[in-house]
Amino acid sequence: MPATLLDGKALAASIRAEARNALAAISVRPGLAVVLVGDDPASRVYVRNKVRACEETGIYSELHALPADTGEHDVRERVQALNRDPRIHGILVQLPLPAAFDAARVLAAVSPRKDVDGLHAENLGALVAGRAKLIPCTPAGILRLLDHAAIPIAGRHAVVIGRSTIVGKPAALLLLQRDATVTICHSKTQDLGAQARRADILVVAAGRPKLVGADMVKPGACVIDVGTHRLPDGSLVGDVDFAAAREVAGWITPVPGGVGPMTVAMLILNTIAAAGAPR
Ligand code: GUN
């Protein structure tokens, strides 16, 4: 029997509808500023989706699209101006930044209280300590998807493929906080298949199209696919070979319509939280 689909699109829509109703009942209008440097086409699409989702929810939003040749110093100054702007409660610096940038230095310029991506060192430290208020959006969305489907986490073996600061590491920390036994795999891991096959919950955030096939999935496992790749034929695929893996898994996220919409929904919740409004 094919796996049950974890429908991130539907869950995200219901979270956004709840947020819209909550905002309609209060006087504060949360504000989000998105800073985009350069013209990466994928980033442009992500940013447009985020700004549109905010508008639909009743969140004020500003897009600060800066040319690719903007200096790092100027970007940090823009961020600092947004830190002081009372209309803005959340600031998101879209990644990746141009290669010449020191991304950590730019992220450090964001006020921790406005850091709706949860990527400032202070918020990442709070996450390690288990008292984070602003959690990176994609990992937060993954946990919401698991909880919504009532997938057990405590005592289960979670394997996270990918060790990025934005997805892999925080996802592993959140699963650990929920008492999973967690393995983190990466490009130097030996026998990735053997590691992956031990997973009750397999989170794939490797950035490689169709890296995970059916042979890497334990029968009945929950497979969370964080990847999004546009193939030359125009189709969108994830880091998991969906058609093959769904025949083995117990639950699986589709691409598109799985983790992606949850990231946007969590951004909205983080922006509302940063504004101090009730969730
Ligand atoms: N690039 C791809 N996904 C994200 C995200 O969730 N936040 C930021 N800041 N950049 C991204």
Image: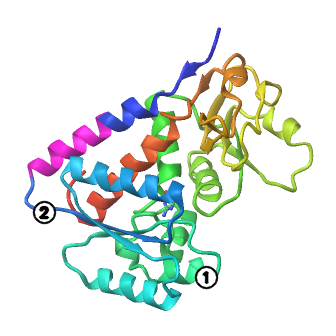
Q: Are marks 1 and 2 in contact (CB under 8 Å)?
A: no
What colour scheme does the image use? rainbow
Farthest residue to the front: give it.
Answer: 233
In the picture, the disc for residue 102 is: 1
Picture disc at residue 37: none
Look at the picture and state if 269 lies above or below 258: below
Q: Nearer the viewer, residue 246 or 278?
A: 246
Mark 2 Cα-neighbour bin, 10 Å: few <14, some 14–19, many ≥20: some
Give left or right: position of 116 versus 191. left
Q: Secondary structure at mark 1?
A: loop
Amino acid type, mark 2? Val
Residue found at x 57% / y 60%: 166
**Residue at (43, 31) in percent of width and height:** 148
The amino acid beneath tag 1 is Asp
Crowding around mark 1 (Cα neighbors within 10 Å: few <14, some 14 to 19, many 20+) is few
Q: Quadrant of residue 114?
A: bottom left
Q: Is residue 175 magenta?
A: no
Residue 74: where, in percent of width, then height? 44, 89
User: Which residue lies under the disc numbered 2?
Assistant: 28
Give the image quarter of residue 81: bottom left
Taking the spot 39% from the left edge, 64% from the top edge, the residue there is 116
239, 132: nearer the viewer: 239
